[in-house]
Image: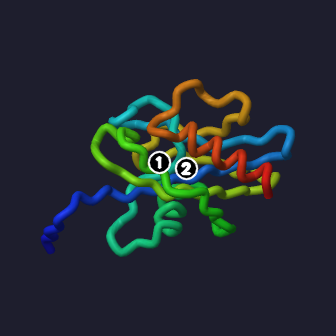
Amino acid sequence: MQYCYDYPRPAFCCDTVVCCGPAEARKVLLVQRGTEPFAGCWALPGGFVDEGERPHAAARRELAEETGVIWEGPMVPLGAFGDPGRDPRGWTVSAAYLADLGLDEPLIVPGDDAAEARWFFVDELPEKLAFDHGEIIAAALWRMHCL
C-alpha cells in the first residue's frame, strides 16, 4: 500500500530503560550498537515500531531481541522524545518506557543488531550514548525518585 500525505511523517520508535538492583546500587541495561548509526556506541534497547504494532509491545519485542530479557511486568511510559537531529537517518520520534525489574538481575544475551549487552551502574554509565539516550535515562531516573 502506498501513502500520500500533505505533511512529512516521522518514523516511530521505542526505547526502554531497564533498571535493576537496590536503590543505592541501581543498574541500567545497555546494548552496544552493532550497526550504524552510532555503531560501537552504547544505547538503550529499542528500535522501530512495526506497522500495526502497539508501542509497548514493540518495546518488549526489541528488549527480548536485543538482550534476551523477556519482561512481562509494567512498562511505565516516560514520554515521547523527538528532538530534531536525534537520529542522523531522519526524523524519528521514540516512545520511551521504564521497566524496573526490582532486585533481580537477569542473564542477558546480546542478539539482533546488538553487538554486546551489559548492566551499568547508574553512576558509571558510558560518557557518550547513542541518539538522545542520556536524556531518556535522566527522565527515567527522575521518575524513579518521584514514585
Question: Which one is in front, 134 or 122?
Answer: 134
Mark 1 crowdedness (10 Å alpha carbons): few <14, some 14-19, many ≥20? some
Q: Residue at x 71, y 45 (%)?
A: 141
Q: 129 above or below 84?
A: above
Question: Residue at 34% of width from left, 36% of height from top?
Answer: 37
- According to the picture, the residue beneath numbered tag 2 turns out to be 67
- The quadrant in which the C terminus is found is bottom right
Q: Secondary structure at mark 1?
A: loop
Along the viewing direction, whichever of 141 and 36 lies nearer the viewer: 141
Q: Residue furthest front?
A: 6
Which amino acid does the dot numbered 1 rest on? Gly
Q: Residues within 10 Å of mark 2 (few under 14, many from 20)?
A: many
Q: Is residue 107 left or right of residue 110?
A: right
Q: What is the count of numbered marks? A: 2
* Callout 2 touching callout 1 (CB < 8 Å): yes
Q: Residue 17 placed where, x, y %? A: 61, 50
Task: Check the picture and name the quadrant holding the N terminus.
Answer: bottom left
Sequence order check, earlier mark of 2 and 1: 2
Q: Residue furthest top?
A: 127
Q: In the figure, 68 relative to 130: above or below?
A: below
* Residue drawn at point x = 42 percent, y = 50 percent: 82
For label 2, the SS is helix
Q: Please give the residue where the numbered disc 1 appears in the rendered image.
A: 111
Q: Position of residue 58 (x, y in %)?
A: 46, 64
Real-space Cα separation, disc 2 to disc 1, in angstroms = 6 Å
Say left or right for 60 vs 84.
right
Residue at (64% x, 30% y) in the render? 125
Label drawn at residue 9: none
The image position of residue 5, as x and y in percent, is 17, 67
Residue 35 rendering spot, x and y as whole percentages: 35, 37
Could you tell me the amino acid type at mark 2? Thr
